[in-house]
Amino acid sequence: MEPTRSDEDDLLRREASYGRGGFLLQFMLNTTLSDAERYPPKLSDTIVIDVNREAAPIRIIWASRKEQIIHAGLDLHEGLTISKETSHLLLIHDVAGAAAAVDRLVHMSLTENQQFALTSFVFRFGEGRFRDSTLLRPLNQGDYASVPAQLMRWNMETVNSVLSASTGLTNRCKAEAKLWVS
């Protein structure tokens, strides 16, 4: 940027406002950003739990599908610590895969928020379920308006062999639908 137009404080405020990827694209004209930089994961997308060895297995796998399991050699055990940077990199890796799947499968142009909403959906349910979903087909035919209602259909979970709406999944679906239309 022209040094007489923006001082260092102004640039730092803009970078904080746009996020690193948005700032680089908007102000540094860097068009070679990776998906991980364009669609950074958010802390609100993570779950941190304390593992009681008596109540839980030593190795915990938390994923909605087999492909989502992190193969990083992280065998959980008492006293294991993962740095914030390592956990952030692992999350970026997973989210980048979901963003790439959206790029591959959606044949219509998307706004940034629409891309984020679908990336969140694919991150939760996987590329295969997205590819075969009733959400993708109408979207690729140009039916953008049907997407929020389609997103809201993915709020069910099975507990004790009973299929019912999950409050957590419903909230996530609402957030994705709201992001889609914003």
Image (tube, grey):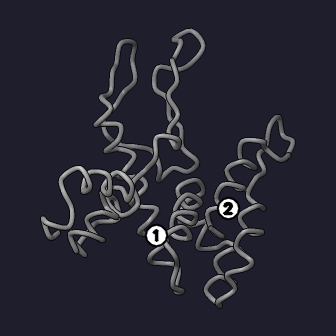
- Horizontal side of 137 relative to 111 (left or right) equals right
* Of residues 13 and 115, the one drawn nearer to the viewer in this rendering: 13
Query: In the rendered view of the protein, which quadrant contains the C terminus?
Result: bottom right
Q: Where on the picture, by quarter, is residue 150?
A: bottom right
Determine which residue is flagged by label 1. Answer: 101
- Please tell me which residue is depicted at 85% across the width and 46% down the height of the picture: 164
- Horizontal side of 160 relative to 66 (left or right) equals right
Horizontal and vertical percent position of residue 79 = 35, 12
Horizontal and vertical percent position of residue 152 = 76, 61
Which amino acid, mark 1?
Answer: Ala
Determine which residue is flagged by label 2. Answer: 178
Horizontal and vertical percent position of residue 138 = 69, 84
**Secondary structure found at label 1:** helix
The residue most toward the front is 4
Q: Is residue 52 depicted above or below 20 in this figure?
A: above
Q: Where on the picture, by quarter, is residue 125?
A: bottom right
- Horizontal side of 140 relative to 41 (left or right) equals right
**Secondary structure found at label 2:** helix
The residue most toward the left is 3
Which amino acid, mark 2?
Answer: Lys
The residue most toward the top is 54
Q: Is residue 165 depicted above or below 50 in this figure?
A: below
Horizontal and vertical percent position of residue 157 = 76, 46
Q: Is residue 55 depicted above or below 152 in this figure?
A: above
Query: In the rendered view of the protein, which quadrant contains the N terminus?
Result: bottom left
- Mark nearer the viewer, 2 or 1: 2
* Of residues 37 and 161, the one drawn nearer to the viewer in this rendering: 37
The number of numbered discs placed on residues in the rendered structure image is 2
